[in-house]
Image (tube, rainbow, N blue to C red):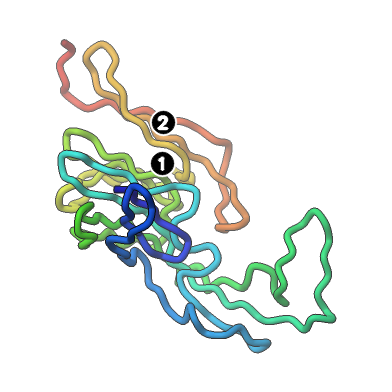
Amino acid sequence: MVAVAGKNGYLYGLSRDLNDVFFRTPVTRVENVDAPLTAEGTRFLPGTQGGTNWYGPSYSPPLNALFVPAIDWATTIKLAAPGSLKHDPPKPFIGSANGFGEQDPQDQRFGHVTAVDADSGQVIWKYDADTLMVAPVTPTAGGVLFTGDTKGNFLAFDAATGRVLLKRDLGDPIGGGISTYMLDGTQYVAVSGGMKNPIIQSDSGPAWVAIFALPGQPKL
């Protein structure tokens, strides 16, 4: 099978030849997506910044589970009269009166990590955050899932249940890679952070990498 998550707020399970859709599981709120655009404005979810962006789902073979990070943040688009539209190459031609749209206030933006059964598409558990989730989700053979949020929290979950095992404030938004490795018998986790991004409205100092080691682990 092939799994893919998009900006429309869904996780898809597809056949290897991509001809069959086995499941379509929502991982954000999905509202008003078929409503016509109007000059007064049309509000919809997950929004132009929402859904799953540059990070993708990950897979845990021991649990046969997919893990999907996503943004849940509504957008209002206002239709523009044709005569008012101007194209300024090489900028994108948007075709609206307010560009990529007006986002809901920051206190109304949310993030999620959703664990999904890879065969059926059923939701196993869901973590809801009061900020955006744009970091990758990294499962381990030991049953731990690592990710981060745009408030700077580095998070570790029990991958089977969604229970939060660790929440550490590292100061700057986390939106880059999280990887694990072993050196001289000690297991490490590397977290990349620091992200100034006007699209998701995050501010930050310089980029950095933080490295954690599992406590009390004897060297082999």
Q: Residues within 10 Å of mark 1 (few under 14, many from 20)?
A: some
Which x, y percent locates residue 33?
48, 78
Amino acid found under the numbered disc labelled 1: Leu
Residues under labels 1 and 2: Cα distance?
8 Å
The answer to whether 30 is drawn above or below residue 158 in the figure is below
> Is there any visible trace of residue 158 in the rendered image?
no
Give the residue at x 33% y 47%: 16
User: Which callout, 1 or 2, points at the residue further toward the start of the chain?
Assistant: 1
Give the residue at x 52% y 41%: 194
The answer to whether 114 is drawn above or below residue 37 in the figure is above
Q: Residues within 10 Å of mark 2 (few under 14, many from 20)?
A: few
Q: Position of 203 compared to 168: left or right? A: right
Give the residue at x 61% y 73%: 102
Q: Quadrant of the C terminus?
A: top left
> Is there any visible trace of residue 64 in the rendered image?
yes
SS for callout 1: loop
Tag on residue 170? 1
Q: Read off the residue under disc 2.
A: 210
The answer to whether 29 is drawn above or below residue 192 in the figure is below
Tag on residue 21? none
Which x, y percent locates residue 3?
34, 51
Task: Say if mark 1 contacts mark 2, CB within 8 Å.
Answer: yes
Which x, y percent locates residue 192?
45, 35
Amino acid found under the numbered disc labelled 2: Ala
Give the residue at x 18% y 58%: 124
Q: Quadrant of residue 186?
A: top left
